Image: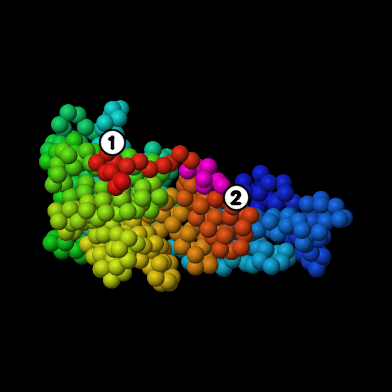
Amino acid sequence: MDRILASPHFARSATLNRFLRFVVEHTLNGKDQELKEYRLGVDVFERGADFDPRIDPIVRMQAAKLRARLAEYYAAEGREDALVISIPKGGYIPTFEAKEKTAPVSRDLQSIAVLPFVSMSSEVENEHFSDGLTEELINVLTYVPGLKVVARTSVFCFKNSAKDVREIGTQLNVRTVLEGSVRKSGNQLRVTAQLIDVTTGYHLLSRTFPREMKDVFALQEELAGAVVGEIMPQMGIETRPVVRSQTGNLEAYNLYLQGMFIAGRDFRGPKDSVAIFTEVIEKDPTFAPAWAGLAYAYSLMSWFLMMPSKLAMPLAKSAALRAIELDPQLGLGHAVLGMVHCIFEWDWEQGEKRFQKAFEVQPSLASAYTCYTFCCLMPQGRFAEAIAATERALELNPLDTILAGSAIFTYGAVGDYAAAQRQYAVAKQANPNHAYVEAALGVAHQKQGNFEQALAMFRTACALAAGRTWELPPWVRLSP
């Protein structure tokens, strides 16, 4: 218990520290029958002899906080503890449960995290290019059937990290990690890449690719093909990864990569990325991924109430249709159309077809599984499928904050409050100040009947989201 009380979850709260110690020591000393609400109010919270628990909810409120804090502790630094202490709802007597030892996690060789490639020059422009190369390699690999590819937002959490790749592989639950560096001088590129088996630390691949900038797409295909050849040697050459929907405008390409990176970053992301994708399309109207990115950004603006759905969703649909017209294999375009069909047009059958097409053409596209959960499965009461889709998304993108918030909401909606608390603890480690995460746990508390805690979470979410309003694009006008 001393380790729990010394943890950051309890060290900063003298009240919860005292509460947990009191109930545990009384139970271990055989005095658990004394753990009544009145006794706790007087002895722990110093309410005085006239304390009336029917009027003053202090004990119930603090007990809810204690349960939440314990869940957070066991999801983080206490995850390896051999003994789990919990306070069952409806009482104040703690239980003590020995945690069963689990077998080591099996990590399939056919799984990979592409870490941000390091720019070997100091110019910001070159760093953006290195990030973009990383992003596009991830995107190319997501089209490979049977290969689990961790999404960009999770791997970019390790940008400039000093962590050992084996530790990163364990955290992301992958068998292989690709890392490398980019040296760019004028029109000349020199990309160095290493593919590492994180269970042994051995290099599976180490190569240098000297190229000209005009050959950047061929470089991506060659590097992705070399990686897949090492991880999945059973694949035929006809199913090797290829770069889709290329553009001859390198400036447009770099802008597109920037737009995709910031689209889901925070509440400013969707609005900022709309402007970027619009600029990309002006430079190259036939670049399909930019149309898909624009569609996704508009759908996010609708979802987060940054723009009225009656304006945002038709714009999202129009952009998604154009993307698929240019490239029918763009998973993101199909996923956005699935959203529009389900939650704007209420056409469940067409929405289902679009989502299944997205999974078929791009099986490792994490955002598609999240959209499927919220727009198609949850509204129809298909909760078991919603949990499965959520966990697939988390497997592909374990450190994404918006996805984590969505998972918290899903777990809370189906009544799995312990899972919601665990996911909240993970999300707070990745991003401690995200409004969506706070609001999602608030919904879980509300459904559980913890209204005081729900209100507190909602107030925090409102404070974090303050000022995030929507504005109409200049080409859209409301009818009088």
Which color mode does the image show? Answer: rainbow
Q: CA gap, disc 1 to disc 2?
A: 39 Å
Query: Please, is residue 433 above or below residue 121 in the view?
Result: below
Residue 3 got which mark?
Answer: none
Q: Amino acid at mark 2?
A: Ala
Q: Nearer the viewer, mark 1 or mark 2?
A: 2
Choose between 439 and 217: the one closer to the eye.
439
Q: Which residue is mark 2?
A: 456
Where residue 119 sits: x, y (%)?
29, 34
Choose between 327 and 457: the one closer to the eye.
457
Q: Is residue 37 magenta?
A: no
Q: Which residue is mark 1?
A: 128
Query: Please, is residue 400 above or below residue 128 in the view?
Result: below
For label 2, count other residues whose C-alpha is less than 10 Å away and answer few (under 14), some (14-19) or many (20+): some
Q: Quadrant of residue 277?
A: top left
Where residue 243 sits: x, y (%)?
17, 51
Q: Amino acid at mark 1?
A: His
Outermost residue toward the front in this view: 480
Our reading of the magenta stretch's main secondary structure is helix
Q: Residue at x 52, y 45 (%)?
A: 462
Callout 1: helix, strand or loop?
helix
Choose between 8 and 265: the one closer to the eye.
265
For label 1, count other residues whose C-alpha is less than 10 Å away and answer few (under 14), some (14-19) or many (20+): some
Q: Earlier in the sequence, mark 1 or mark 2?
A: 1
Decide if residue 465 is on the left or right side of residue 77.
left
Report if residue 10 is visible in the image: yes
Callout 2: helix, strand or loop?
helix
Q: Is residue 460 magenta?
A: yes
Q: Which residues are magenta?
A: 459-465
Where residue 312 sits: x, y (%)?
31, 50
Where residue 162 sits: x, y (%)?
42, 40
Q: Where is the N terminus found, in terms of image quarters?
A: bottom right
